[in-house]
């Protein structure tokens, strides 16, 4: 059996560029049929957008601005080509940010990354991305369907029942966050259940530090990762070579200087900007807010597309915690609900291979009751539990930061 999903993965770079940019003008024109894109790209002649040099001249669309844009023009800011009632599904991601799913197969381009992770037709995949409102589970389910695999819709939580399903149905592969895979393995070990059918995993939505990857491998699960966002699907994915992440076919990726649309030299860290060919919900120079860098050369696995170093932090202060985005606007809302506080700052870290977060809040007269009240507000606003630490007024830096990501990179 081939080591590659199809011949697109091994084509010459010039051939790939010619294909993508030969189709780009038509995609820009299609996008501009939607009012949001028509406004954002006002004055642009789609017919001239046929090269990277021309693409660079288009403005970036910042993912961080979607909340405001969608409030002004619900439900999708006018960036959808497909009408909401004619979409397959309508999603709500944390923020909230809303996205439509069109009717094409493997709409998020996940099958290719599953194949690279060792999944093959006939495999049973235990899918532990959330099926509740957000698109992650449906992205991976569509990829599994394209690949010819059966899916157990595990979702998140209900750990005991999930362990029972794994022990009985014996899935060979896992998809979900790496943290939850460890939770399942720990729960199975504690309950004395056999989940050794798991041999491989494709994870996303949370950090995969080397220590966690090594632990999962020692427990029999060979795990690779992919990098995806709701608006574009899988942007890049790890291969058995484990040397960076290979950019997905059928999209254009740029690395730009944060806060601008200007490309950085190869190897420099910058913001990931993505252009897609999704006919229903196109993205033209979407600035993801994530940092990465281009790696030189091609992957030893034989795939010839651009490689990036993976997630290297945030260009803005938004952080992904346990697979969910936490945004500066949410931290401001917490402070608004507790006017007795001064500066606040959310610190995101790791503890025992799990994401954790602690809200540091300045207050002259803090007590346990206030800490408990703030913790409840933190959970209500972000949908995640976190600790609270009351600190003296003036003790937090006056640097404008409200979220600090202290997790190790890599």
Image: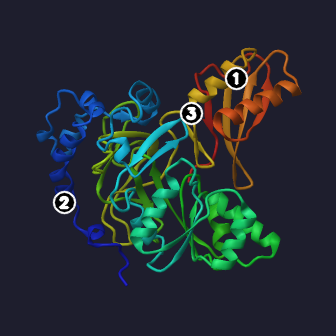
Res. 239 in view: no
Residue ID at (42%, 75%): 148
Mark 2 surroundings: few (<14), some (14-19) or many (≥20) residues within 10 A: few
Q: Name the residue at the left extreme.
A: 47
Q: Name the residue at the right extreme.
A: 368
Mark 3 surroundings: few (<14), some (14-19) or many (≥20) residues within 10 A: many
**What residue sits right under mark 2 in the picture?**
14
Closer to us: 279 or 276: 279
Label 1, secondary structure: give it. Answer: loop
Task: State left or right for residue 90 relative to residue 352.
Answer: left
Residue 396 numbered mark, or none: 1
Tell me how far mark 2 sits from mark 1, CA to CA.
51 Å
Label 3, secondary structure: give it. Answer: loop
Q: Is residue 392 shown above or below 44?
A: above
Q: Nearer the viewer, mark 1 or mark 3?
A: 3
**What residue sits right under mark 3 in the picture?**
327
Res. 369 in view: yes
Q: Is residue 8 shown above or below 100?
A: below
Q: Name the residue at the front extreme.
A: 85
Residue ID at (17%, 27%): 43
Q: Is residue 303 shown above or below 178?
A: below
């Amino acid at each position: 059996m081939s080591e590659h999903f199809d011949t697109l993965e091994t084509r010459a770079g010039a051939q790939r560029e010619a294909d993508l940019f030969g189709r780009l003008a038509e995609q820009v024109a299609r996008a501009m049929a939607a009012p949001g894109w028509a406004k954002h790209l006002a004055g642009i002649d789609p017919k001239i957008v046929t090269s990277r040099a021309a693409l660079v001249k288009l403005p970036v669309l910042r993912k961080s601005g979607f909340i405001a844009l969608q409030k002004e023009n619900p439900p999708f800011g006018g960036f959808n080509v497909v009408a909401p009632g004619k979409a397959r599904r309508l999603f709500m991601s944390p923020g909230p940010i809303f996205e439509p799913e069109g009717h094409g197969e493997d709409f998020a381009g996940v099958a290719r990354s599953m194949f690279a992770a060792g999944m093959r037709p006939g495999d049973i995949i235990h899918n532990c991305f959330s099926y509740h409102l957000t698109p992650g589970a449906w992205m991976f389910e569509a990829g599994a369907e394209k690949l010819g695999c059966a899916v157990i819709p595990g979702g998140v939580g209900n750990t005991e029942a999930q362990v029972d399903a794994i022990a009985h149905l014996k899935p060979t592969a896992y998809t979900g966050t790496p943290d939850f895979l460890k939770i399942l393995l720990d729960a199975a070990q504690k309950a004395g259940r056999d989940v050794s059918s798991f041999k491989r995993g494709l994870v996303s939505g949370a950090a995969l530090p080397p220590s966690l990857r090594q632990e999962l491998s020692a427990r029999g699960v060979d795990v690779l990762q992919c990098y995806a966002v709701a608006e574009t699907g899988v942007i890049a994915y790890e291969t058995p070579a484990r040397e960076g992440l290979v950019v997905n076919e059928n999209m254009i990726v740029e690395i730009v200087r944060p806060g601008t649309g200007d490309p950085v030299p190869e190897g420099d860290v910058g913001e990931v900007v993505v252009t897609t060919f999704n006919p229903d919900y196109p993205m033209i120079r979407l600035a993801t807010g994530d940092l990465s860098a281009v790696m030189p050369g091609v992957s030893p696995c034989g795939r010839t597309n651009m490689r990036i170093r993976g997630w290297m932090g945030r260009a803005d202060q938004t952080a992904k915690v346990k697979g969910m985005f936490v945004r500066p606007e949410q931290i401001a809302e917490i402070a608004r609900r507790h006017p007795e506080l001064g500066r606040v700052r959310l610190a995101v870290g790791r503890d025992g291979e799990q994401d954790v977060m602690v809200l540091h809040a300045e207050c002259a007269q803090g007590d346990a009751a206030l800490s408990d009240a703030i913790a409840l507000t933190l959970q209500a606003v972000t949908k995640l539990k976190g600790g609270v630490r009351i600190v003296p007024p003036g003790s937090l830096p006056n640097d404008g930061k409200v979220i600090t990501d202290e997790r190790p990179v890599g």
